[in-house]
Every structure is written in C-alpha cells, then in structure tokens.
Image (spheres, rainbow, N blue to C red):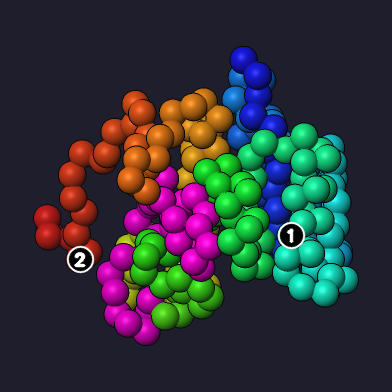
Amino acid sequence: MERLKTAILISGRGTNMQALIEECAAPDAPAEIVFVLSNVPGAPGLERAKDAGLTTGVLDHREFGDRESFEDALSATLEGHGVEFICLAGFMRLLTNRFVDHWRDRLINIHPSLLPAYPGLDTHERAIADGIKFVGCTVHFVRVEMDAGPIIIQSAVPVLPDDTPETLAARVLAEEHKCFPFALRQAAMGNIRIVNEKVIVDGAEPPPGAVANPDTRH
C-alpha cells in the first residue's frame, strides 16, 4: 500500500510530533513523515526531528509581508517535498481561507480542550477557573475559524480538586499522544469520511459507557 506522505508543522518543542514519529516508524504504518517544517527558526522540535532522521525546514513568517505570501510559500515548499497530508502539531499561526481551502480535508490539528469549548490559548487555566469537571483534547480537520472543524477524536480527562494548569496539562498531553497518531493512522488507511461536516471513522466504536466526576459509584 502506498503510504500517505505527511508533513508536520511545528512552532515549538514538538512533543506531539514525537508521537507521530513513533507511529510512523512502524514497518506497517500507513503514513510516512516526509517533511517537518517550523515557522520559528531554532524551534526545539527541529532537533528532535533531525535526531529521528527526518528532513526539516524553516520558513520564517516574519520575512513575509502578509499572511497570504507566507502561506503561498508554505504550500509551494510542502508540495515540493511531495506532501499529501498535513498535521499541525503546535503550529502557532492562524491560517487564511486560501490555505485552508487548498488543503481542505488534508489538514488536521490537535487542540488541548474538548472543542468547541475553550478554543485559543490558556485552556487549562480557563477550565480550572470555571470549575468544570472534565477537560481533554481534540483532533479535528482544520477550517478557517480558529480551532474549528470536523472532529475526528476526543479524549476526556477529569479535573482533580488540587490540579494546577501544569498538572492538568501533563495528563491531557498524555492523551494527545494517543489521539493524534490514531487520527493520522485512520486518515492514512482511508477510514475517515466527512458527511455534512461531521466525521465518521469506519470501524471505530464509542466507549462502552459514561464516566462521572466525582465518581457516582462510590
């Protein structure tokens, strides 16, 4: 089977990128990472990618006069590396409609909340301040609105009474490292369909029951 040629776009550490690298390292993985690009020169994730033997590049958005010219160069660079599919792994740029439409349904993002709740930054601080009982992460197809688009997978994490934003973020990140590879794998296998802007993952089953926080079984 032809493997899905995938690029990962990063701006920072690339911890979610590492989960994708490990996913694609398996001999039977349906996707392969052909390029890692950062818009931030010196982003720590670039070294992580190089250590994994991946081709990397930098396209500094500050060198362009506007978003459109940056994104045109970004698309040209990605296509020059044969990229068919893109994973945004901490890529801290809002994308314009032209770029999103060009890569429509071939562009996925991971966000540390149960979207549509808490788009944007400081998700864990905001959740703790609001006193909600569950947070989580979401992998979704990208649309032009910030942190919006058809949802592929979500994972819920309970908020503990003594949680700080840091402890909560660490537990959510562990779930991100499961969900992002799952989403890429299902996309590469052709198991994902978008119907009326909702995702159907063929062969996937929902969890068997509900979870309450606090636990009602005690």
SS state under label 1: helix
Residue 142, image x, y percentages: 52, 54
Observer-nearest of 35 and 75: 75
Is residue 151 shown in magenta? yes
* Cα separation between marks 1 and 2: 46 Å
Name above or below for residue 155 compared with residue 68: above
Q: 172 left or right of 28?
A: left
Residue at 42% from the left image edge and 80% from the top image edge: 126
Q: In this picture, which residue range is highlighted in magenta?
A: 127-156
Residue drawn 35% across the image and 56% down it = 156
**26 versus 142 height, above or below:** above
Q: Left of 150 or right of it: where is 122?
A: right
Residue in the image at 66% along x and 61% along y: 91
Residue 128 percent location from the top left of the image: 38, 79
Residue with the mark numbered 1: 71
Q: Is residue 101 magenta?
A: no
Which quarter of the picture shows residue 10? Answer: bottom right
Q: Is residue 206 above or below residue 163?
A: above
**Is disc 1 surrounded by few (<14), some (14 to 19) or many (20+) residues within 10 Å?**
some
The quarter holding residue 58 reads: bottom right
